[in-house]
Protein backbone atom coordinates (compact mmCIF):
# COMPACT_ATOMS: atom_id res chain seq x y z
CA UNK A 1 0.00 0.00 0.00
CA UNK A 2 1.30 3.43 -0.89
CA UNK A 3 0.05 6.98 -0.68
CA UNK A 4 -0.08 9.34 -3.61
CA UNK A 5 -1.38 9.44 -7.17
CA UNK A 6 -0.70 6.55 -9.53
CA UNK A 7 -0.39 7.68 -13.17
CA UNK A 8 0.76 4.60 -15.03
CA UNK A 9 0.97 0.83 -14.50
CA UNK A 10 2.40 -2.00 -16.59
CA UNK A 11 2.49 -5.79 -16.25
CA UNK A 12 5.86 -7.45 -16.82
CA UNK A 13 6.27 -10.94 -18.37
CA UNK A 14 6.91 -12.37 -14.89
CA UNK A 15 3.48 -11.12 -13.78
CA UNK A 16 4.81 -8.30 -11.60
CA UNK A 17 2.90 -5.04 -11.85
CA UNK A 18 4.92 -1.84 -11.73
CA UNK A 19 3.25 1.48 -10.99
CA UNK A 20 4.56 5.03 -11.33
CA UNK A 21 3.14 7.88 -9.30
CA UNK A 22 3.83 11.00 -7.27
CA UNK A 23 3.37 12.14 -3.70
CA UNK A 24 4.40 15.41 -2.05
CA UNK A 25 6.96 16.46 -4.64
CA UNK A 26 8.49 13.01 -5.14
CA UNK A 27 8.23 10.50 -7.96
CA UNK A 28 7.95 6.80 -7.17
CA UNK A 29 7.94 3.46 -8.96
CA UNK A 30 6.48 0.58 -6.97
CA UNK A 31 6.57 -3.17 -7.55
CA UNK A 32 2.98 -4.00 -6.63
CA UNK A 33 3.75 -7.71 -6.09
CA UNK A 34 6.56 -7.24 -3.57
CA UNK A 35 5.62 -3.81 -2.25
CA UNK A 36 9.19 -2.65 -2.93
CA UNK A 37 9.87 0.96 -3.94
CA UNK A 38 12.13 0.84 -7.01
CA UNK A 39 12.44 4.60 -7.59
CA UNK A 40 12.25 7.56 -5.22
CA UNK A 41 13.20 10.89 -6.85
CA UNK A 42 12.43 14.58 -6.43
CA UNK A 43 9.99 15.71 -9.10
CA UNK A 44 6.44 15.38 -10.31
CA UNK A 45 4.38 15.66 -13.47
CA UNK A 46 2.64 12.59 -14.84
CA UNK A 47 5.29 9.86 -14.74
CA UNK A 48 5.13 6.92 -17.15
CA UNK A 49 6.95 3.61 -17.52
CA UNK A 50 8.51 2.10 -20.62
CA UNK A 51 6.84 -1.11 -21.87
CA UNK A 52 9.72 -3.26 -20.56
CA UNK A 53 9.65 -1.57 -17.14
CA UNK A 54 13.30 -0.52 -17.34
CA UNK A 55 12.80 3.23 -17.86
CA UNK A 56 10.73 5.98 -16.30
CA UNK A 57 9.92 9.41 -17.72
CA UNK A 58 9.04 12.12 -15.21
CA UNK A 59 9.23 15.89 -14.70
CA UNK A 60 12.17 17.10 -12.58
CA UNK A 61 12.16 20.15 -10.32
CA UNK A 62 13.11 22.38 -13.28
CA UNK A 63 10.01 21.10 -15.19
CA UNK A 64 12.16 19.20 -17.68
CA UNK A 65 11.26 15.68 -18.69
CA UNK A 66 13.89 13.17 -17.59
CA UNK A 67 14.23 9.56 -18.72
CA UNK A 68 15.48 7.47 -15.77
CA UNK A 69 17.18 4.07 -15.97
CA UNK A 70 15.43 2.05 -13.24
CA UNK A 71 17.85 -0.93 -12.94
CA UNK A 72 20.97 1.28 -12.92
CA UNK A 73 19.39 4.20 -11.02
CA UNK A 74 20.72 6.93 -13.31
CA UNK A 75 19.57 9.50 -15.85
CA UNK A 76 19.43 8.29 -19.45
CA UNK A 77 18.43 11.58 -21.12
CA UNK A 78 16.94 15.01 -20.44
CA UNK A 79 14.21 15.94 -22.93
CA UNK A 80 14.62 19.66 -23.56
CA UNK A 81 11.61 21.88 -24.25
CA UNK A 82 10.68 25.54 -23.97
CA UNK A 83 7.13 24.68 -22.88
CA UNK A 84 6.05 25.50 -19.33
CA UNK A 85 3.99 22.31 -19.06
CA UNK A 86 4.75 18.92 -20.59
CA UNK A 87 1.72 16.73 -20.08
CA UNK A 88 0.92 13.06 -20.48
CA UNK A 89 4.38 11.74 -21.47
CA UNK A 90 4.25 8.29 -23.06
CA UNK A 91 6.73 5.79 -24.42
CA UNK A 92 6.40 4.28 -27.87
CA UNK A 93 5.69 0.51 -27.90
CA UNK A 94 9.38 -0.26 -28.49
CA UNK A 95 10.46 2.17 -25.75
CA UNK A 96 12.65 4.10 -28.18
CA UNK A 97 10.62 7.35 -28.25
CA UNK A 98 8.86 9.56 -25.72
CA UNK A 99 5.99 11.85 -26.75
CA UNK A 100 4.40 14.55 -24.60
CA UNK A 101 1.84 17.32 -24.96
CA UNK A 102 3.41 20.77 -24.96
CA UNK A 103 1.02 23.20 -23.28
CA UNK A 104 2.10 26.75 -24.06
CA UNK A 105 -1.17 28.54 -23.36
CA UNK A 106 -4.72 27.32 -23.11
CA UNK A 107 -5.98 25.82 -26.42
CA UNK A 108 -2.55 25.92 -28.08
CA UNK A 109 -1.33 22.39 -27.38
CA UNK A 110 1.17 20.65 -29.62
CA UNK A 111 3.16 17.43 -29.33
CA UNK A 112 6.89 16.89 -29.17
CA UNK A 113 8.58 13.52 -29.69
CA UNK A 114 12.11 12.74 -28.48
CA UNK A 115 14.56 9.89 -28.75
CA UNK A 116 14.38 8.44 -25.23
CA UNK A 117 18.07 7.52 -25.18
CA UNK A 118 19.69 10.60 -26.69
CA UNK A 119 17.17 13.34 -25.88
CA UNK A 120 17.19 14.50 -29.52
CA UNK A 121 13.89 15.81 -30.92
CA UNK A 122 12.48 13.25 -33.37
CA UNK A 123 9.26 15.05 -34.37
CA UNK A 124 6.96 17.99 -33.58
CA UNK A 125 3.21 17.79 -34.23
CA UNK A 126 0.35 20.27 -34.09
CA UNK A 127 -3.19 20.83 -35.35
CA UNK A 128 -5.84 20.89 -32.61
CA UNK A 129 -7.66 24.11 -31.72
CA UNK A 130 -8.26 22.89 -28.17
CA UNK A 131 -6.47 21.14 -25.31
CA UNK A 132 -5.24 17.61 -26.09
CA UNK A 133 -6.93 15.41 -23.49
CA UNK A 134 -5.70 11.97 -24.59
CA UNK A 135 -2.55 10.77 -26.35
CA UNK A 136 -1.32 7.30 -27.31
CA UNK A 137 0.90 5.51 -29.79
CA UNK A 138 -0.52 2.98 -32.23
CA UNK A 139 0.51 -0.62 -31.50
CA UNK A 140 3.20 -0.52 -34.22
CA UNK A 141 4.49 2.91 -33.17
CA UNK A 142 3.83 4.41 -36.62
CA UNK A 143 1.12 6.84 -35.44
CA UNK A 144 0.17 9.03 -32.52
CA UNK A 145 -3.54 9.32 -31.73
CA UNK A 146 -5.11 12.09 -29.71
CA UNK A 147 -8.37 13.67 -28.65
CA UNK A 148 -8.90 17.44 -28.60
CA UNK A 149 -12.03 19.54 -28.69
CA UNK A 150 -14.60 17.94 -30.97
CA UNK A 151 -12.14 15.81 -32.91
CA UNK A 152 -9.93 12.76 -32.86
CA UNK A 153 -6.49 13.26 -34.42
CA UNK A 154 -4.03 10.90 -36.06
CA UNK A 155 -0.43 11.95 -36.67
CA UNK A 156 1.97 9.90 -38.75
CA UNK A 157 5.41 9.57 -37.19
CA UNK A 158 6.90 10.44 -40.59
CA UNK A 159 8.25 14.00 -40.16
CA UNK A 160 6.32 16.55 -42.22
CA UNK A 161 3.19 14.41 -42.70
CA UNK A 162 -0.11 16.27 -42.31
CA UNK A 163 -2.39 15.09 -39.48
CA UNK A 164 -5.75 13.47 -40.10
CA UNK A 165 -8.72 14.93 -38.23
CA UNK A 166 -12.01 13.17 -37.58
CA UNK A 167 -14.39 15.94 -36.51
CA UNK A 168 -17.37 14.68 -34.54
CA UNK A 169 -18.55 17.90 -32.90
CA UNK A 170 -18.28 21.50 -34.01
CA UNK A 171 -17.26 24.22 -31.62
CA UNK A 172 -18.64 27.69 -31.15
CA UNK A 173 -16.41 30.76 -31.35
CA UNK A 174 -16.58 32.79 -28.13
CA UNK A 175 -14.22 35.78 -28.28
CA UNK A 176 -11.00 34.08 -29.39
CA UNK A 177 -11.81 30.62 -27.97
CA UNK A 178 -13.39 27.54 -29.53
CA UNK A 179 -15.95 26.29 -27.02
CA UNK A 180 -17.25 22.71 -27.32
CA UNK A 181 -20.53 21.65 -25.71
CA UNK A 182 -19.65 18.07 -26.66
CA UNK A 183 -16.07 16.89 -27.00
CA UNK A 184 -13.95 13.88 -27.83
CA UNK A 185 -12.08 12.86 -24.68
CA UNK A 186 -10.33 9.65 -25.79
CA UNK A 187 -9.16 8.02 -29.01
CA UNK A 188 -7.22 4.87 -29.90
CA UNK A 189 -6.33 2.80 -32.97
CA UNK A 190 -6.88 -0.95 -33.28
CA UNK A 191 -3.72 -3.11 -33.55
CA UNK A 192 -3.97 -3.19 -37.37
CA UNK A 193 -4.52 0.63 -37.56
CA UNK A 194 -7.81 0.13 -39.43
CA UNK A 195 -10.34 1.03 -36.70
CA UNK A 196 -10.38 4.23 -34.69
CA UNK A 197 -12.29 4.11 -31.41
CA UNK A 198 -13.36 7.37 -29.77
CA UNK A 199 -14.96 8.34 -26.51
Image (cartoon, grey):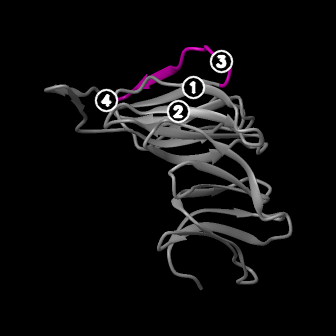
Figure check: 11 above or below 64 = below
Figure check: 52 above or below 27 = above
Kindly check if marks 1 and 2 are in contact, taking CB atoms under 8 A apart as contact: yes
> CA gap, disc 4 to disc 1?
26 Å
Q: Which residues are magenta?
A: 157-169
Give the mark, 1 or 2, whose residue is nearer the N terminus.
2
Figure check: 59 above or below 171 = below
Q: Which residue is mark 2?
A: 111
Give the mark, 4 or 2, whose residue is nearer the N terminus.
2
Kindly check if marks 1 and 3 are in contact, taking CB atoms under 8 A apart as contact: no
Q: Which residue is mark 1?
A: 124
Q: Is disc 4 surrounded by few (<14), some (14 to 19) or many (20+) residues within 10 Å?
A: some
> CA gap, disc 1 to disc 3?
8 Å
> CA gap, disc 1 to disc 2?
6 Å
Dot 3 falls on a residue whose secondary structure is loop
Q: Is disc 1 surrounded by few (<14), some (14 to 19) or many (20+) residues within 10 Å?
A: some
Q: Which residue is mark 3?
A: 159
The one nearer the camera, 142 or 30, is 30
- x, y (%) of residue 47? 58, 58
- x, y (%) of residue 197? 53, 38
> CA gap, disc 4 to disc 2?
22 Å
Q: Residue at x 43, y 43 (%)?
A: 84
Residue 166 counted in the magenta span: yes
Give the mark, 4 or 1, whose residue is nearer the N terminus.
1
Amino acid sequence: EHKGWTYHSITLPNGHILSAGINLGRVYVWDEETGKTLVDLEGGGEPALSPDGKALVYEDLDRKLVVWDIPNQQTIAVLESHSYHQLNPIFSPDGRLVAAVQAWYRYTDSIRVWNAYTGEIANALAGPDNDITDLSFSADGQYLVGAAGGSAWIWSMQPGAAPEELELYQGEINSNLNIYTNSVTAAALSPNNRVLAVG
